[in-house]
């Protein structure tokens, strides 16, 4: 649902939406907005607060500035290509569990 639908009073509902009377007051026939009514709408704005988990997820989504060890990448690619790479399932599982635990706390 877009903001225009909300301001129109949720579509075809006969009741006015949040701030509908203020929105009508800001419109004039010449297209200029009434500053006093606009201030009233701004005062009624809502705030959004993110949870700690959402903040951590947002930070995790930011690109990291870690440098890539191209020698290590090349050696792992070579080991994968020739079949000599043997991943340690225990270490992988432990790190996945630690990651999940960190997300939940």
Image (cartoon, rainbow, N blue to C red):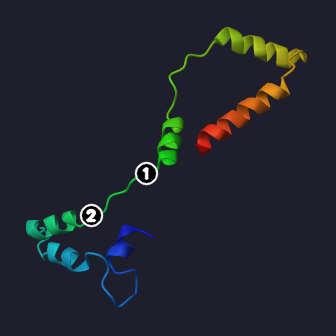
- Which numbered tag is attached to residue 50? 1
Q: Quadrant of residue 37?
A: bottom left
Disc 2 crowd rating (10 Å Cα; few below 14, some 14-19, many 20+) is few
**Image quarter of the N terminus:** bottom left
Horizontal placement of 18 versus 59: left or right? left
**Image quarter of the C terminus:** top right
Q: Residue at x 30, y 84 (%)?
A: 16
- Tell which residue pokes out farthest to the top in this image: 71
* Label 2: which secondary element: loop
Horizontal placement of 70 versus 21: left or right? right
The total of numbered circles placed on residues is 2
From the top left corner, tell me how far across and down residue 85 is, in percent.
Answer: 86, 17
Q: Which residue is mark 2?
A: 45
Horizontal placement of 88 versus 4: left or right? right
Q: Residue at x 77, y 15 (%)?
A: 76
Q: Residue at x 56, y 16 (%)?
A: 67
Choose between 1 and 54: the one closer to the eye: 54
- Which numbered tag is attached to residue 73? none
From the top left corner, tell me how far across and down residue 53 is, in percent.
Answer: 52, 46
């Amino acid at each position: 649902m877009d903001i225009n639908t909300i301001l129109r009073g949720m579509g075809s509902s006969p009741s006015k939406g949040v701030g509908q009377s203020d929105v009508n007051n800001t419109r004039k026939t010449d297209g200029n907005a009434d500053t006093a009514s606009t201030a009233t709408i701004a005062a009624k704005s809502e705030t959004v607060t993110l949870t700690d988990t959402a903040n951590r997820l947002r930070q995790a989504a930011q690109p990291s500035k870690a440098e890539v060890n191209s020698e290590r990448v090349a050696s792992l690619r070579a080991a994968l290509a020739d079949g000599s790479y043997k991943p340690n399932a225990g270490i992988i599982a432990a790190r996945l569990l630690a990651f999940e635990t960190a997300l939940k706390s």
